[in-house]
Amino acid sequence: MQEFETLKHLVTEAEEDVRKAEGGNKAAGTRVRKKMQEIKSAAQDVRKKVLEGREEPEAGGGGATAGAAEEEA
């Protein structure tokens, strides 16, 4: 899933600046906060993609149930 790979890449990019921010580097802290916003957005994209995958099989199953109801009527 490409969205998950993007998320992992963003976290990896933030790693060095997180270490610098822990050492007191204020500019690195600013970069980390900005990257965290990107990570938040990427995580939401992953959630949406997972939900889409979960909804697809249900849509197919609903059609079979509707067909069975038609046969009974």
Image (cartoon, rainbow, N blue to C red):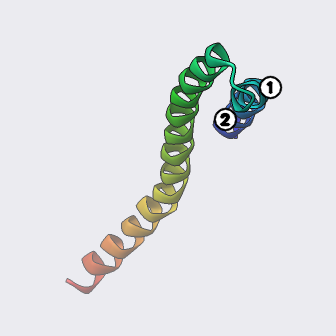
Q: Nearer the viewer, residue 35 or 27?
A: 27
* Image x and y of residue 8, in percent: 73, 37
Quarter holding the N terminus? top right
Marks 2/1 in contact by CB < 8 Å: the verdict is no
For residue 59, what is the image quadrant?
Answer: bottom left
Residue in the picture at 45% in, 64% down: 58
* Image x and y of residue 7, in percent: 67, 35
Cα separation, mark 2 vs mark 1, equals: 16 Å
Which structural element holds mark 2?
helix
Query: What amino acid is found at the position of numbered circle 2 in the picture?
Result: Leu
Q: Relative to residue 26, is residue 67 drawn left or right? A: left
Q: Nearer the viewer, residue 47 or 19?
A: 19
Up/down of 52 relative to 59, above or below: above
Q: Relative to residue 73, is residue 62 drawn left or right? A: right
Q: Residue furthest left?
A: 73
Residue position for label 1: 16
Which structural element holds mark 1?
helix
* Image x and y of residue 41, in percent: 50, 32
- Label number found at residue 7: 2
* Image x and y of residue 16, in percent: 80, 26
Q: Earlier in the sequence, mark 2 or mark 1?
A: 2
Q: Nearer the viewer, residue 47 or 28?
A: 28
Query: What amino acid is found at the position of numbered circle 1 in the picture?
Result: Glu
Count every numbered label the image shows and give the total.
Answer: 2
Up/down of 39 relative to 51, above or below: above
Q: Relative to residue 56, is residue 6 drawn left or right? A: right
Q: Label 2: few (<14), some or many (≥20) within 10 Å?
A: many
